[in-house]
Amino acid sequence: MCGIVGYIGNKSALDILLDGLTNLEYRGYDSAGIAVNVDNQVELYKAEGKLQNLKDVTALNRAHIEKSTIGIGHIRWATHGAPTKTNAHPHSCNCGRVAIVHNGIIENYKELRAKLEKQGCVFRSQTDTETVAHLIASKFANTKDLAEAVKLASKEIEGAYALCVIHQDVKDTIIATRRNAPLLVGIGEGEYYIASDVPAIIKYTKKAMYLDDNQIAVLTPNSMKLIDIDNNALTPKIEELPWEPVALSKMGYKHFMLKEIHEQPNVVRNVLAGKLRAIDENVILNEVTLDKDRIKNLNRIQIVACGTSLHAAMVGKYIIEQYCGIVVDVEPSSEYIYRKTITDKNTLVIGVSQSGETADTITAIRQAKSKGSHILIITNRPDSTMAREADSLIPVSAGIEVSVAATKSYMAQVISFYLLAIYMAEIKGSVAVQDLERLKKELVLLPQKIEKVLSHKEDVQVCARKFANSKDFIFIARGINFPTALEGALKLKEISYINATGYTAGELKHGPIAMLDESMPVLSILVKGGVYEKILSNSEEAKARNARMIALTNSEDTKLTDLFECIIRIPEIDEMLSPALAIVPLQLLAYYISEFLGKDVDQPRNLAKSVTVE
Ligand code: M6R
């Protein structure tokens, strides 16, 4: 949560900071700010609300601010303290000589604040971050060495942080450090860029160094020194960033979400490439380092994830149990970490995460790792914290996802689960070869079917207009598409703020049916297969209570037209693979409803793309 940028070099820092923050807006957008050093004076500029407000503030003083060739910036997703200008970063100390930006949570900030207040520090904000600014300033007053001051302060801080610090008295230096929150340093010619994520700097450099926990980078325009918290000198590990700047363009689409929905056919092709080479060949998944005997002996799989990734994991459970005959438990990471979990070396623990930085999932996999389980990570960010913790890593290659509402990363995760299930089933011999071949054939055909859905969006648009003013929405499904119902409902509530819930259709009559009346839309996911008739009959029950019925179906059954007010059609597909196709119209439905209502599609209120706090 929150985005950090920093720059030191020979160019004006202002536009680099604002540009970096623009590309980090997906991490939070409650307020924003920058700190620069102009004419030997640290100056702070802050604004509440969207980044544009900060851009407007700095525009008033552009010629002056532009003089600074050093600066730090921040875009906030509020944790401690309301999203106001006062609570916006950067934060400073009594004398205003230090400025810091912070991502994470300082757990012992109350104790630190009490101690600092006794020493005369005057706090202006309600944030945990301001304690760090005062703490560093007080350490600097004694040491006159900024790196030393940051080092001493970090020994007193408990919690998670990525920090960037400047000080008026050391005007050619930025200090960057982290513990349990991501931070990287981009390397240019006579300049350094700092960011909490690649999009902020990829336009300027592809050479970067990821900081590890408790490392401190001391940056001047012409030098980078890396030390640890005990002052040992370290050798920076410089990497080539695997991203292209073009990933951050909307490519003519009105919103990133719409662009990302349309990228899904190619995302499927990318995920399959090199892994599924022919229908009659075994799936190749060299990324899984668990040896074949251990796969055969697995007695249990636990999958931990949050939000949309959790729904992908639920599809994963269904297919792994179906094809591999291994018991799979799926649990939200935030629940997994607060109870006694039973894992051992014959348990495979899978962490699923678009960002690879979700704090609860990181904690969950660390917990499982400490008990000896093999950790397999499925993530869109092979450069993330989670990826670094992995014993096996399946990078899902969806490309950078900017919209807060996850779409293409869900698709990539789901397809990765199909590959994993087939891979393990082939090792275990747990299912007939013909069944696996049928599934592989369907996987290969999937991109074209998604393209068909994307080129016939009219049904979805009509339905979106009809139901956009609904206060509530119910999605029902059974079996392998229950996660599709949950994900469809999540997409809708995230970006339109309509109260949407997914239910297993059979549960409707055990309570939710009481809510049905002529104002309640019920969307039935009716894919031909084992549970088709059952869902149809549950839909009849809902219709009998006057609910407004919508079908998402691949059936041509004529009786559907009497039962459903709106019918959204998808191509023929094997029920086992249908979640990967059925989700696409639901993403579009959420998108068009949100757009129709004039909501902020890519940056819905209260949300952030990457939830790096527990
Ligand atoms: O990066 P992760 O996949 O770990 O993120 C998990 C959730 O925060 C995320 O899926 C969230 O629910 C999205 N906003 C869904 O659109």
Image (cartoon, grey):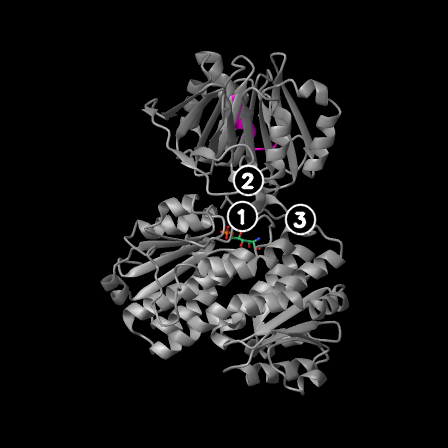
**Residues shaded magenta:** 125-134
Q: Main secondary structure of the magenta part?
A: helix
Report the side of 367 relative to 294 (left or right): right
Farthest-out residue, bottom: 559
Residue that label 2 marks? 199
Identify the residue at image location x=70%, y=51%: 254
Q: Nearer the viewer, residue 168 or 596?
A: 596
Q: Amino acid at mark 2?
A: Pro
Q: CA distance from mark 2 to mark 3?
A: 21 Å
Identify the residue at image location x=50%, y=76%: 575
- Residue 109 location in percent, x, y? 50, 32
Residue that label 1 marks? 400
**Category of crowding for the residue at label 2, using alpha-carbon neighbours closer than 10 angstroms: few (below 14), some (14–19), many (at least 20):** many
Q: Which of the two discs, 3 and 1, labels the residue nearer the N terminus?
A: 1
Report the side of 100 relative to 242 (left or right): right
Tags 2 and 1 touching, CB below 8 Å: yes
Label 3, secondary structure: give it.
loop
Q: Nearer the viewer, residue 467 or 265?
A: 265
Q: Is residue 160 positioned above or below 263 on the image?
A: above
Q: Which of the two discs, 2 and 3, labels the residue nearer the N terminus?
A: 2
Residue that label 3 marks? 605
Q: Amino acid at mark 1?
A: Ile
Label 2, secondary structure: give it.
helix
